[in-house]
Amino acid sequence: MIVRRLAARTGKPPSASSVRPLHNCRILTAHVTPGRSAFAQANAAAAPARQWRRSFASDVDLLEHSADNSLKETRSIETALNSSMPQPVPSYNPNAARQAALTDPTVAVNWYNKKELERILKPVGTAPEPHYQPHTLITNPPRPEDVTLELLLASQAHLGHATSVWNPSNARYIFGIRDGIHIISLDQTAAYLRRAAKVVTEVCRRGGLVLFVGTRNGQDRSVVKAAKLARGCHLFDRWIPGSVTNGQQILGNCKLKVVDELDRDMPDFEDQLTDQPVLKPDLVVCLNPLENYVLLHECGLNHIPTIGIIDTDADSTWVTYPIPANDDSLRCTNVIAGVLGRAGEEGQKLRLEAARQGIVTYKGRAKLEEPDTFASKQKQQEGGQAGEKPTVRPGDGSSLQGLQGREAI
């Protein structure tokens, strides 16, 4: 029908070359409305071409967008971390902080209360600390000469148990009753703690081995610190029954070493250590005797002295040197363990000072013999005796360690 209209307008029959493009443009001119202008008809004919161009442009945009996404996904880890970092903190303004402090109404009240407390406590010989730092009891424990009633009172060493569960053997340690709870006399606590500290000092001075035991939650750090100061051993886990009475079977595989009077390792003794008996502690410090009754019983069977914190509900006859105090307060046990650890440190210093002067404060094992080394040969040539025993001061010999056979677990 389109070809006939064109032929009627021109008056000539259509050629084959004109039919083909008209055939191809049938779709383009199919929607052209009669009566419209040529410009409108041309725009309508070019509409599919514009649509194709839009689709091509949209594909290009998609490719660029995917390329940008790939670059964002493959960016460095540093960039990702920097992007996830929080916003920088604004700078500190001292004027604003000063104004906020001035507007706080409790600052003046706290200051006057602090001054009033200092005025009251100054005649007693003490002063309140500005800040409470509980970790100092472990990192820097007090010494035996630092033990005061104020320190014990602040550590809650005076609080006992209910009067219904008290043990009559602790009647001499009880100061009174308050709200149905026994109050421990801090004078007795300070006296018995100083006595126990002297025992630890003397045992360490004579080369003895001190075992610190604390199996409750939170006592591990103080026990380890005290053992390091006294150069002893520690136990903060469950006590294995028979470790003392049947130690040859339970602790037979523990490694031993031989040191001299200055704690220097001495080689060539490995062959002689295989037949040696198991090393036993010379003193046991127990922070919670109620849970370690088996340990205290084994120490009593082997004549090993013990030191323990005795509360109002415990039996003071379980240990050799009782310390009446509150064993339920973690701060109290930290103070006592730190004081005894410092006492052991002082004893070790005295032993090393005496050793530098040529004085040995402990006896050696008789079964250990000096190995046949170059030094022993020189002693034999000079007329010395190879198995000469170290010099011992009068009254010494409480330790199981010695110059030639001083062993440590």
Image (spheres, rainbow, N blue to C red):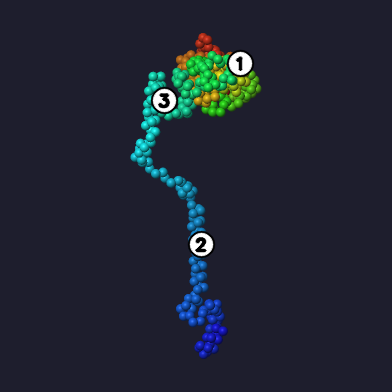
Marks 2/1: CA distance?
88 Å
Q: Which residue is mark 1?
A: 300
Marks 1/3: CA distance?
43 Å
Q: Residue at x 54, y 19 (%)?
A: 182
Identify the image quadrant of the N terminus.
bottom right
The answer to the question of whether label 2 and label 1 lie on touching residues, with beta carbons closer than 8 A, is no
Q: Which residue is mark 3?
A: 128
As shown in the figure, which amino acid type bears the numbered disc 2? Answer: Leu
Is 92 displayed left or right of 39 in the figure?
A: left
Please, is residue 39 above or below residue 279 in the view?
below
- Callout 3: SS: loop
As shown in the figure, which amino acid type bears the numbered disc 3? Answer: Pro
The residue lying toward the viewer, choosing from 262 and 370, is 262
Give how far across and how far down residue 149 sits, in percent.
Answer: 46, 19
The answer to the question of whether label 2 and label 3 lie on touching residues, with beta carbons closer than 8 A, is no
The residue lying toward the viewer, choosing from 287 and 268, is 287
Please, is residue 200 above or below residue 51 in the view?
above
Q: Which residue is mark 2?
A: 62
Sequence-first disc among 2 and 1: 2
Sequence-first disc among 2 and 3: 2
As shown in the figure, which amino acid type bears the numbered disc 1? Answer: Gly
Q: Residue at x 50, y 53 (%)?
A: 74
- Residue 365 disc label: none
Give how far across and how far down residue 312 sits, in percent.
Answer: 56, 19
- Callout 2: SS: helix
Task: Please identify, in this view, whether the residue under mark 2 or under mark 3 is nearer the observer.
Answer: 3
| Residue 195 in sight in this render | yes
The residue lying toward the viewer, choosing from 19 and 155, is 155
Identify the image quadrant of the C terminus.
top right
